[in-house]
Image (tube, helix red, strand yellow):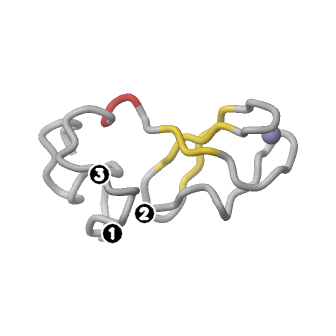
Amino acid sequence: MPIYEFRCAVCGQLFEKLCPMGETGENIACPNCGKPGPRRVMSSFCAHGKKSDNGGSDLGGGGGGGCAGCSSTSCATCGH
Ligand SMILES: [Zn+2]
């Protein structure tokens, strides 16, 4: 599973969480204030070079490494 970065809209807390591919933050609560639904922040290491961004639908979802924009095994942009 990828690690996504989230920012709480209420208190501004920035945190990382290991969550299922395509997680948008709806099922996550802020560790600081407990408010659900933080905003997802794209990690800087893979924010560029994406072919398309259609709302974070799952690409693959298999095992191993890979970032949100990778097809699990080969990604030229982040090296996974
Ligand atoms: Zn918060």
Q: Residue at x 26, y 32 (%)?
A: 48
Tag of residue 32: none
User: What's the residue type where badge 3 is placed?
Assistant: Gly
Sort mark 1 into few (<14), some (14-19) or many (20+) by Cα contacts within 10 Å.
some
- Report the residue marked by disc 2: 21
Q: Is residue 14 left or right of residue 79?
A: right
Residue linked to disc 3? 66
In percent of the image, x 33 and y 48: which residue is there?
A: 67
User: Which residue is at the far right?
Assistant: 33
* Kind of element beneath mark 1: loop
- Nearer the observer: mark 3 or 2; the answer is 2
Query: SS of the residue at dot 3?
Result: loop
- For disc 3, the neighbor class at 10 Å (few under 14, some 14 to 19, many from 20) is many
Mark with earlier residue (3, 2): 2
Residue placed at 24% from the left, 52% from the top? 70
Question: Image check: 46 left or right of 12?
Answer: left
- Quarter of the image containing the C terminus? top left
| Ligand 1: image quarter | top right
Q: CA distance from mark 3 to mark 1?
A: 9 Å
Secondary structure of the residue carrying numbered label 2: loop
The residue type indicated by label 2 comes to Met
Q: Is mark 3 within 8 Å of ligand 1?
A: no
Residue ID for mark 1: 61
Q: Is residue 55 above or below residue 46?
A: below
| Residue in front for this viewpoint, 73 or 35 | 35
Quick check: marks 1 and 2 in contact, CB under 8 Å? Answer: yes
* First along the sequence among labels 3 and 1: 1
